């Protein structure tokens, strides 16, 4: 649509750009509040130029984790922009400083997706530990010829160490599930969390390398920042015990993916349970072919109730920001 038609006329309703088609019930509270909704019609990432072309004059942007919210987009939106609501807990795709400098509020969706994401981590971990992909494929191919004492032997988790990097909301939920499976919990992060650790009987490990060495399962829950990018690199992968399973339901770039692929290829680790990848939606061919991985298309929060709750968070944030700015 040409820019002229996107710039609000005096007295017209504030416009909310929504970068994916979303179910009508999720959007209804915004319509009911009298906002104009400019909703993308394709369930695919919008090219940055296309998003910039829609942004001028918008009061709010409801974006996804694969939209880049940078100074160029914020400037394209202009001074009408009050809030960016991202349909994700992660905010690594948003230039928070650029938003703050322009007085634009940024809202994300913490809390409501914690359990769903930890469930996904455990689903993938169990799939790797118990070789569920191989078992399922065997049955599906019609090649199962009866019980075997030695077929598809997997890895026990009880009495093993679940090493958590980042004991935030999702890391803690992952650890609670680990305790329920009889695992010991150790964790690393910028600081100890004595209360959470007491509930989990968890050990704080100030040295990340030492945590990695002690891991039977290593689960990554740090936010992606310049200092956590590739925190699991070739050197640290080499510290893992050879049976260790790596779990990542956070951000793909926490891991140096080619180094992980090499460690799997060379049998230097036990397996990988991955919901996220460095260059989504691309997944290295060698990962696709590896038997000891479980891979999912970034669907940690993908349950009906969780996504509806995330939408409600975005709606509330948009309505609050526009009410405060006197535009809704
Ligand atoms: C998912 O990755 C999220 O950040 O919500």
Image (cartoon, grey):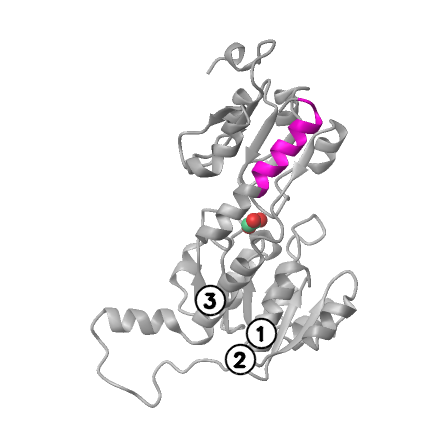
Residue ID for mark 1: 178
Q: In the rendered view, does 23 fall on the left or right side of 13? A: left
Looking at this view, is 84 or 128 the one in front? Answer: 84
Q: Which disc is residue 214 wearing?
A: none
Q: Specify the principal SS of the magenta part.
A: helix
Q: Is residue 241 visible?
A: no
Which secondary structure lies at badge 2? loop
Q: In 3D space, how far apart are the residues under numbered discs 3 and 1 (Cα atoms)?
A: 12 Å
Label count reads 3
Q: Position of residue 312 (x, y in %)?
A: 55, 42
Sequence order check, earlier mark of 2 and 1:
2
Q: In the rendered view, does 205 fall on the left or right side of 213? A: right
Q: In 3D space, how far apart are the residues under numbered discs 2 and 1 (Cα atoms)?
A: 8 Å
Sequence order check, earlier mark of 3 and 2:
3
Q: Which disc is residue 123 wearing?
A: 3
Q: In the rendered view, does 309 fall on the left or right side of 205? A: left
Q: Which residues are magenta?
A: 313-326
Which secondary structure lies at badge 1? helix
Q: Are marks 3 and 1 in contact (CB under 8 Å)?
A: no
Residue ID for mark 2: 157
């Amino acid at each position: 649509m040409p820019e002229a038609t996107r710039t609000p006329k005096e007295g017209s309703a504030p416009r909310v750009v929504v970068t994916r088609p979303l179910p009508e019930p999720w959007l209804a509270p915004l319509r009911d509040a009298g906002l104009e909704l400019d909703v993308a019609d394709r369930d695919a990432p919008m090219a940055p130029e296309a998003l910039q072309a829609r942004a001028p004059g918008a009061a709010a942007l409801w974006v996804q984790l694969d939209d880049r919210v940078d100074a160029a987009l914020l400037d394209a939106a202009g001074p009408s922009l009050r809030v960016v609501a991202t349909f994700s807990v992660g905010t690594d795709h948003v230039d928070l400083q650029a938003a703050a400098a322009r007085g634009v509020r940024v809202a994300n969706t913490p809390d409501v997706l914690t359990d769903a994401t930890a469930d996904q981590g455990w689903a993938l971990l169990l799939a790797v530990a118990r070789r569920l992909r191989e078992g399922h494929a065997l049955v599906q191919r019609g090649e199962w010829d009866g019980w075997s004492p030695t077929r598809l032997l997997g890895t026990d988790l009880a009495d093993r160490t679940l090493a958590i990097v980042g004991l935030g909301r999702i890391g803690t939920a992952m650890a609670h599930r680990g305790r329920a499976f009889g695992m010991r919990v150790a964790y690393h992060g910028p600081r100890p969390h004595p209360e959470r650790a007491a509930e989990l009987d968890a050990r704080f490990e100030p040295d990340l390398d030492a945590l990695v060495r002690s891991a039977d399962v290593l689960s990554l829950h740090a936010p992606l920042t310049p200092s956590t990018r590739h925190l699991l690199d070739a050197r640290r992968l080499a510290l893992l015990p050879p049976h260790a399973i790596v779990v990542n339901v956070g951000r793909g770039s926490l891991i140096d993916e080619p180094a992980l692929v090499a460690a799997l290829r060379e049998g230097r680790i036990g397996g990988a349970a991955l919901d996220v990848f460095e260059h989504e939606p691309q997944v290295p061919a060698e990962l696709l072919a590896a038997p000891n991985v479980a891979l999912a298309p970034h669907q940690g929060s993908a349950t009906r109730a969780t996504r509806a709750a995330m939408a409600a968070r975005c709606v509330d944030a948009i309505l609050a920001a526009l009410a405060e700015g006197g535009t809704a």
